[in-house]
Amino acid sequence: MLQAVSLRCSRGERRLFTDLNVKVERGSLLAVVGENGSGKTSLLRIFSSLLSPEQGSVLWEGQDILQLKELYAGQLTYIGHLNGIKDDLTPLENLMSAMSLAGESCSNNGAKEALEAIGLKRPIHQLPSKVLSQGQKRRVALARLWLSTRPLWLLDEPFTSLDTAATAVVTQRLHTHLQRAGLAVVVTHQEVALPTEIVQRLRLTG
Amino acid sequence: MSMDINWLKYSSPQAFYPLAGRLIPWFACVVVVLMGVGLYMGFFVAPTDFQQGEAYRIIFVHVPAAWMSMFLYVVMAVWAGIGMGLNARLSFMMAQAIAPTGAMFTFLALLTGAMWGKPTWGAWWVWDARLTSELILLFQYAGVMLLRTSIDDLRRADRASAVFALVGVVNVPIIYFSVQWWNTLHQGASVSMATGSKMASTMLTAMLLMTLAFWLYSIAVILARVRCIMVERESLPVWNEKSAVIQEAVEAR
Amino acid sequence: MQWSSASEFFAMGGYGLYVWTSFVATALCMGWEVLALWRRRAATRAEQRASLLGGADETTA
Amino acid sequence: MNGSSMWEAVSGIIRRDLLLAMRRRSDAAMSVFFLVIVVSLFPLGVGPDPVVLRTIGPGVLWVAALLACLLSLSRVFTADYVDGALEQMVLVPQPLAVLVVGKVLAHWLISGLPVVLLSPLLGLQFGLSGESLGVLVMSLLLGTPTLSMIGAIGAALVLGVRGSGLLVALLVLPLYVPVLIFGAGAVTSSMAGIGGEANLSLLGACLVLSLFLAPWATAAALRIALE
């Protein structure tokens, strides 16, 4: 269970949110919505422990994530609005090096299957990533979700520059993750097409 | 009154701001008195040095400036460390307030050192361990301040300059040692700053008085600067209802 | 007292240039620092007062 | 979080960075070219007198190596910072300081080691004897990793900051002074017949110290840069 307790966050002079409390249970998804600049990404970064809140704390299974440190990092998969893709590496190399860095090494075949699952055909796997389109690069980043065994997923605008087919595939993958008692926090300006009883919406007003 | 004063209370900017404001005039008065006495002793009581003649009188500003330059760097690093450890805004503001004064004393130590070196050693500059470390110290002060001004986000500026200040504190002793080592290798340039002559007690007294004056001057100036920084940063007029500013404002109406 | 005249005092046994440059430079630096801080404080106060009076106007209006 | 998965993460970083360097060989070649050009400029500036060249040789070679290291510093983290790979690195279930060591080691293999390997050739231009050449290589072998370690702190501090190229030089050069003194000193003393062992062991001490301290400072700086 992921819990935010009276979080406060400012960027520069601007107060983004104060006294924010929210709880995400296993098997459910938190959709963070709001206008640009309302602090959605900041909230996700606080959840990921990249950003420390001005006040308040984030608890994972009842323990402060800033105390858990690397143990907490071992529980989550974070995909920010930057893809973390190296232009000079192929999609396959990118995916495999990202997984081995995260401590979840995968086989060559496993990585290929993940890339295929998100709709990147085999010939593309061997091209340098710099020739890919934005949507294809996003898919390479999101392919990690098919290999991740972590319970908590933190996704920043995962559907950006994805076509409808890919959006549906990713949504389906999210659904499977939740059904296996996973949790997810998704920052999005689109509706997440999942059953309403497992989706909790948090609107930030800025 | 028990000794159980709540020191933590003063660690909040709201309580610190008026306290610092009350302390500054006192420090300023003591500085004026100490400097007056110190200069009088330095120029009129302390005797002429039999080796260096009157040129030695430069130590009454040189040594205090050099001591303060190093001492202030350590103090700045300590505040930076406290800021990093406790995530305390006031500590970072203190570190920020110390840097310009420390840099000024470092510059003065180098300048007065050159003024002293020319008549005694015959050269404005020698690559002596103390001079070199002092020069590097100036670069580090400059680095701390430049790093701060190049980062727009205040929180990041605070923390990044704190990390650099802490790294620098390890560096300066290593440089001192390494230059000393290097100088023993190059026998020719070996110059020792120790004059060898025994210091008259009046000389020592004058020097210590000047050091104390410089120290209190630093405290006063740093407190004044930290007050300015607080107002600039928080950009709010709500420090304390009793604050003089509000009274002034009311009177002005 | 070791100085018999003011000119002897300013000559500093021939080292006057070095000694006085040091002392004057120190005095100038300190004076400049105090002056700069004084101005900075005046600026912050003016800003504070402006925002205070602005706030007061709103409440009395 | 055991030793083997830690090693896996570190070796993964090193492999990836080496692979990236292989794909962009010009980057790695740049610091070597820089070194050669700077070192070749000195004889043209001070004249071809072999006695003068031999005297200034150790210092020139070391300063040039130091500048070459400095020049390549911006490459340590910038690309990862821009494309988001750095965020992923921070969110790895391993201590960030350990990953920093891997990152810096990879950087040294790409831009430090070529400098070390090329140095004897450049030493010949300055008329260094065989034994001094050996000491030069040894001193660079111990010194350049220290330069990379220290430089990583500066590189992490200025990530995403305007004017970062100049700023990193201002921050890092004062920290390079001891390494320069011991490194050039080792070669000079071997030429004077005193033997460079004392200076070399001091360089080794610097390397050990920087290995223990710099990764923590760099990790802190990276976290600050990413906030």
Image (cartoon, coloured by chain):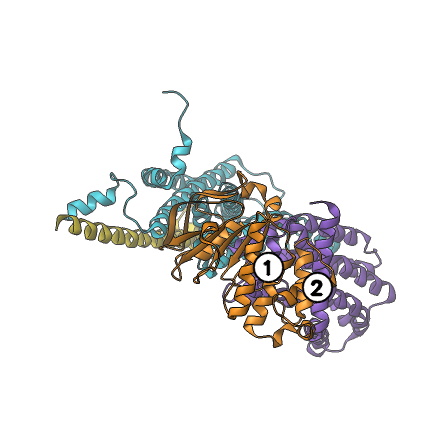
Chain colours: A orange, B cyan, C yellow, D purple
- Report crowding for label 1: few under 14, some 14 to 19, many 20 or more residues within 10 A (C-alpha): some
Nearest to N terminus: mark 2 or mark 1: 2
Q: Is mark 2 on a helix, strand or loop?
A: helix
Query: Within the image, what quadrant is residue A106 found in?
Result: bottom right
Res. B236 visible in picture: yes
Amino acid type, label 2: Arg
Q: Residue sitting at 55 percent across and 72 percent down?
A: A134
Which quarter of the figure is the C terminus of chain A placed in? bottom left
Give the letter of the chain under mark 2: D
Residue type at mark 1 is Leu
In-image side of A5 versus D38 (left or right) = left
Q: Nearer the viewer, residue D183 or A80?
A: A80
| Residue B198, label in figure | none
Q: Position of residue C25 (x, y in %)?
A: 43, 55
Determine crowd level at label 2: few under 14, some 14-19, many 20+ residues with C-alpha closer than 10 A. many
Residue D29 drawn above or below residue B239:
below
Return the mark for residue D86: 1
Residue with the mark numbered 2: D16
